[in-house]
Each structure stands twice: as structure tokens, then as C-alpha cells.
Amino acid sequence: MNIKRCLIFGFVAVFMFFGCSKAPPADSGWSSPNSFSQSASALVSFFSLYKWDNGLIAQNKDGGTFKCYFFDERQNTWKGQDVAGFPLGYTVNMTDPAGKGMVFVSGAVSEKSLEMRFIYGTLNPQFGLNFSNQRKLIFDQTQLFQNLRANQRLGDDRSKPYFPDIGRGFIDSQNIYVPYCFHGETISGNTIVTREGPFDNGVFFSLDSGATWQREHVADLFAFNPAVAKTEKFYYYLAAREDAYELSYARRQGEAGSWESPQMLAKTLVTSGIIPNKYVVVTENDVIHVCWLDQRHETRRRFNLMYPLRGNYEIVYSQRHDSDVGWSKDVILSEGLQYAYSPAMSIEGQKIVVTWAGAPKAESGDAHSEFGDHIEFDPNDIYYVTSKDGGKTWTKPLRVTDNIKAGVTAGSPQVALHNGIIHLFYIQGEVHLKELSPGLTKLNQGPWPIYYKQRPFPD
């Protein structure tokens, strides 16, 4: 009798573990996919989508030239053109949602100093870029790190400078904010210990459209992937703490306030791997909205002797009003999916759309991962959810693409909600492995197509 009960219990456990969640259905409301551009290599791309000049702009420099695509609402089409004058070695940090402004950023770290370059300009679809302010800032390592010890330094002995960790900021009229995370090194005998710092997290900012720049220290954290955003009353600085699997944040009230001490927003953030977008932050009026890649359920076991721990990445959402004393309760948006990657989010009034790449489940071993688990380069589809009430309630996930059965990978989605229409871009292709020797392979990828779809925001 006890054996029978154990067998029944075991069957129920297996069913609940593998079969209790139903894969999200397809959504037929999207337009047919349109091949729009190309990535640099597979899912690796500099393609970006912005709200700009009260419209939409997409940009790509993967092909070696800087190309901009402008959305024409009257004809419901995108018009692309090469833009002359793009500064080589710079990245587009942000665009102005209400104006034609753009900010380009470049940086280089050497052994004892940091050089930052900022260019502010305006873009005219007919005449190209017009740069009005170009500035260079140089910092000695003692200016960046407080209480720098004798066995610590900013950079290493590389023969070439390297680019510092600069995140996406924002433009608000004449005010520009660019976040950063700087990592120094501690020398212990012949060993370089990066986890001991020194560290500097903060923002570069300009209050006059890039004519002058200042630097402001926020925290001393071993952190990466910084972001800075602004609501009506507060400034927010966010960063991923790789050593603690946390997403941390600091707030400052108004221009004259001081930054609060960093606090934890998420304690199970996915920090490892090559996934480019581990979290996304968007502000609208007095609310900050954050989605992140979460691994709180990753340690559930499976029936695999070689890889008993099953991966489980989820998309989690939280928000905070300026008047709130804390963040809202976490909401898992990717219910029904075992794997999710690279969230993207856009907001228009009370309407919110969140999209990501992922899969409902995967086989017990994958050729693309040394841990025998599903990864972002394996076959994935694009999914999305929406909210009509500012994030209080959410729809169930719906599938946009149909790739997994064909062994096709879709990923790196970008989304913009504009005048009631959801505009979606994503990269899609098939992974090819090149065998270097028996048992040793590597990715052998060229550019993949970047596709575009749209649909009205669901009623």
C-alpha cells in the first residue's frame, strides 16, 4: 500500500513539474513579418528603437554606416536613410522624446586615468546630424575612487584602452543624464582581485544641452549595466550587482537633493551569461516601471542524472509611484514559460506592453550550453503581455512568432507603443556550429535578419 501511494505521489509530482503549465497560444493580430535590417552577427546588434521628436526612430550601425529609420504615421511605413557625420567610436546613448536632440558617448580607460567624450547634436531627416556641443573630460584615478590604496588602480596593463561600463540615460529638455559603473583592481601579490574594487557608480550630467558636464558619485558597488531614469519628483539610479544577484537602486529627490543609499529592488536577478538585457526601466509621469530577468525558481530539480538542476528564467515586473513608500508586489509576467530572455517594455499613458524571447520548455540537454540547459541562442519565440490599467492587471502571455518546431531562434526584441500601435522589432535566424576538432565547436554566425511587426494595442 505504501509503495502504491509513493508511485501515485511520484506520478503526480512529475505531472505537476512538467505538465501543469500550458504553453502560451499564438496571437494572430500581428502584421506579417517584414525583413527590416540586419544584425552584426546572430543576436549581436547595435540596432535600437526610440521615441524621438514625438514620433519613432530606429537606428542601426551594424552594416558599417549609421542608418536611421523614421516612422511615417500617415503612410504607416518606415523610411530609412544613411546619415552622414556619425562620429566613429561613439555609441548613441539616448534621444530626446520631445525634440530632435541626440547624445553620443565614448570613453577609454587606461592604467591611471579615464577619458570621456560627449557629443550633443540634433538630427534632421533631410540634412543629417548637426553637432552643437562636443566636450572631453579626463579624470585621474584618485578623482574617481575615494580612499584609493597603494595596491589599487583604475585599469590594468593592457596595451590598448578599453571602454568603461556606460548605461543608457535620458534627455529632459536641456538636462542630460548618463549613468556609469567603474571597476578598479586590487593587486595581491601576482594576483588581480577585481571583486575587492575599488568601485565607483554614478552619473555624468549636463544642464545646458551638453555645453558643460559634471560627474556625481552615487555609490561604491561591484555593479554592472547601470541605468538612470526620472519621474516627476525623483531621479533613479539602477545597476545589477553581479556578486549578490541583486538589482539595486538609489533615489534622489529633485535637482538639489542628495542620493539615498542603495537599496535592493530584486534579490534573484539573473546576472551571469551573455544576455544583454537583464532588466529594463521606463518612467511615465510619476511612476517608474521595472521589468527584470529573474531566477528565483531556477533550482527546481528534474529527472536528468547529468544536469539535475533545471534552468528557469522568468520576467518579473514591479512599479513605484512618487508617493509610494515602497515598490509594488512582484508580478511574474512569463507564466507558462520555462525560459525567458531580454525583456523590453514601452508605455503610453495607462497602456503598457512587455515583450521578450523564450520557450515553454526544452529538452534535457542542449548543444549550445556547457551546462546542458536551454540558452538564448537555442530555438525561441517572441512573447508579449499588456496592461490597460498602468500595471495593476496583466494579460496572459501570447506568442508572436512560430519558430521552435523549425529550430529557429528569435531574440533581442525591441518595442515601442505609439498612438495605440505596438511596434515590434526582433532578430531571427538559425544557429550554425563550426566543428574545430572532435568535441570542440564554436558559433559560426553571420548577420541575421531584423524583422518588424505591428498590431493595435489589444482591447
Image (cartoon, grey):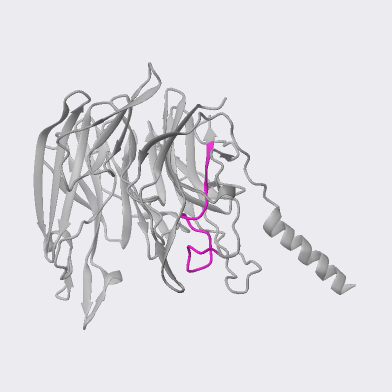
Q: Kindly identify the residue that appears in the image at 58 percent across and 64 percent down.
A: 310
Q: Is residue 284 left or right of residue 11?
A: left
Q: Kindly identify the residue that appears in the image at 67 percent across and 50 percent down.
A: 21
Residue furthest top as drawn: 74
Q: Is residue 320 left or right of residue 363?
A: left
Rendering coords of residue 379 (x, y %): 52, 52
Q: Nearer the viewer, residue 334 or 351?
A: 334
Residue 204: say if magenta: no
117 over 70 or under it: above or below: below
Rendering coords of residue 454 (x, y %): 47, 29
**Range of residues picked out in magenta:** 366-385
The image quarter in which residue 11 lies: bottom right
Q: In this view, does 451 lie to the left or right of 145?
A: right
119 over 15 or under it: above or below: above
318 over 375 or under it: above or below: above
Q: Which of 285 and 315 is in front in this view?
A: 315
Rendering coords of residue 40 (x, y %): 32, 48
Which part of the image, by quadrant, shows the C terminus?
Answer: top right
Which part of the image, by quadrant, shows the N terminus?
Answer: bottom right
